[in-house]
Amino acid sequence: MSDQAALFEYLLRLGDNALILGHRLSEWCGHSPALEEDLALSNVALDLIGQTQLWLNLAGDVEGRGRDADKLAYLRDARDFRNVLLVEQPNGDFAATMARQFYFDAWHYLLLRELTGSKDSRIAEIAAKGLKEVTYHLERSREWVLRLGDGTEESHERMQTALDDLWMYTGELFETDEVDQAMIRSGMGPDLSTLHEPWLGLMHATAEEATLTLPQPGWAQRGGKRGMHSEHLGYILADLQFLQRAYPNATW
Amino acid sequence: MYAQMVKTGVDHIQSKEEMSPEERAFQDRVDQDIKIEPKEWMPEAYRKTLIRQISQHAHSEIIGMQPEGNWITRAPTLERKAILLAKVQDEAGHGLYLYCAAETLGVTRDELMEQLNSGKAKYSSIFNYPTLTWADIAAIGWLVDGAAIMNQVPLQRCSYGPYSRAMVRICKEESFHQRQGYDAMTKLARGTPEQKQMAQDALNRWWWPSLMMFGPSDAESVHSAQSMRWKIKINTNDELRQKFVDQTVPQAEYLGLTVPDPDLKWNAGRGQYDFGEVNWEEFYQVISGNGPCNRQRLRTRVKAYEEGRWVRDAADAYAAKKGARAKAQAA
Ligand SMILES: [Fe+2]
Ligand SMILES: [Fe+2]
Ligand SMILES: [Fe+2]
């Protein structure tokens, strides 16, 4: 794989994570537990949509085939998506959404912090902008894990179930493949395995404070980064891409 | 409007001689355009009418999130998706400001939500129509937010301080929504033949329900007269409807779209458009629960509220524990 091809893949991963998670969060708008949460979840979703545009536009530039963020978002099929499995998992109840968010935000935060030191200044710039937003996302999702974990008996149970159910999708976040290797070699991206320890540290501290039990390390589901997804992604794309597919070449 | 028919509980307009000294002092302040603030004395009927009006408005903002939210996951570009999501988010914010304004009159948000969920409280008839295509999102921004502004801009000057201030914030955002809607409609009207047809179809379906938003003629209504005396209503429904038609018809023409009213005609003598009669039978049916989406809208709202209860309870319980721990530490 050429360095350029690896960079393109890497940027798709960053963009697709933001795109799919932003999409999932936007599904909550109007259906959340309180108006304040409609506002807050939409804020996070809007940040992620903005990050999607930056990453995917850059991916399109790197690829050099005239595809912009919209073309990449709306005209690829599921097997060409590079997001991790975690972000495409259904919203479930509010606890599941917040557990998914907390697992992801903590990783996203650590990753973007590293990427602000990328040798590629375009990456460093997007990461710096995203890091500000994600710092706030992480504060918020961590706060909800605490609230639900240490709230009522019911919320505790739901949050524990959510942490357990989603745990198997976290392993993929720290795996390093040939794309990541190429990024490490060129000084563009970090070794993802080095993020695992600080991530686990935050998980353990938060679980303890929330009176929750963090699941034991176990078998990890993997494949999203290479285009092997769950059944859920196809339905996300059916919604997301409907108009672009039904009316090819129209502008909106 | 968002509050289409607000009862005031009065059966005639009192003359100043009939008023108690308190009532007279209150009316004098209103007449002098002095804002009424929450802690001041106010007639009970004024307070109740305002609660009704503000909460109908708030409920409309909240229910209105559904027809538009219906297209968030299917918006055609990342930019349109962000614009729509931000718009629906604004509507949630409007609901929030308005519930806060209502709370200054001695009622809680939970009480108001219970009234909405039980079907007791009304909200604007417009949100009981379905959004069938993307063009409906453009049409709502253009027409529905456009109609909302017509009545909310004058309400910025209304007599009740908290309501008037909420309106100032809301109006800025609503006019932004209206422009974005018109912009989205322009893209469609100037787009492919299919897009243009989609735009025309949306105008056909949203035109009359938009005119219904202003409510039936209230020139003869004692409630309307009372509300105007209190300055919580500034114009009659017919005045606002006329203004809306006069503003919107040229916009439709500019887009090359046809307003679905065979009786629509410029009246040079009046300097206004003549237009056809709204189907008020349909309006009364929709407002009393028989619109295409009433049951669906209410059920969706109740579901979100009920399914969110354990989350709100958990947040309360956590806050209480945290407070208790902080207290124990301080002791
Ligand atoms: Fe509105
Ligand atoms: Fe609004
Ligand atoms: Fe609006």
Image: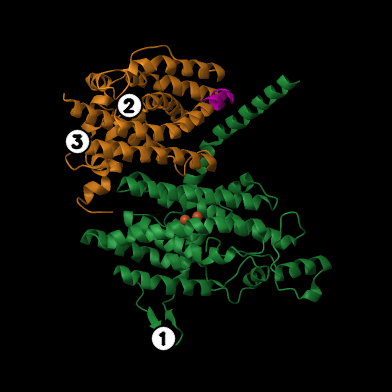
Chain colours: A orange, B green
- Percent position of residue A56, x then y: 28, 37
Is-magenta flag for residue A152? yes
Mark 3 residue crowding within 10 angstroms, few (<14) / some (14–19) / many (20+): some
Q: Quadrant of the C terminus of chain A?
A: bottom left
- Specify which label sits upstream in the sequence, 3 or 2: 3
Check disc 2 and report the residue beneath it.
A118
Residue occupied by mark 3: A63
Residue B179 in picture, x, y percent from top left? 40, 60
Give SS at disc 1.
loop
Residue B265 position within the rendered picture, expressed as x and y whole percent measured from the top left: 37, 81
Mark 3 or mark 2, which is nearer to you?
A: 2
> What kind of residue is marked 2?
Ser
Q: Give the residue at mark 1.
A: B268
Residue at mark 1 to residue at mark 3: CA–CA distance? 60 Å
Which span of residues is magenta-colored? Answer: A145-155
Name which residue lies at 71% across and 65% down: B34
Is A233 positioned to the left or the right of B108 in the image? Answer: left
User: Observer-nearest residue: B38 or A113?
Assistant: A113
Between tags 2 and 1, which lies in front?
2
Q: Is residue B247 magenta?
A: no
Q: Closer to us: mark 1 or mark 3?
A: 3
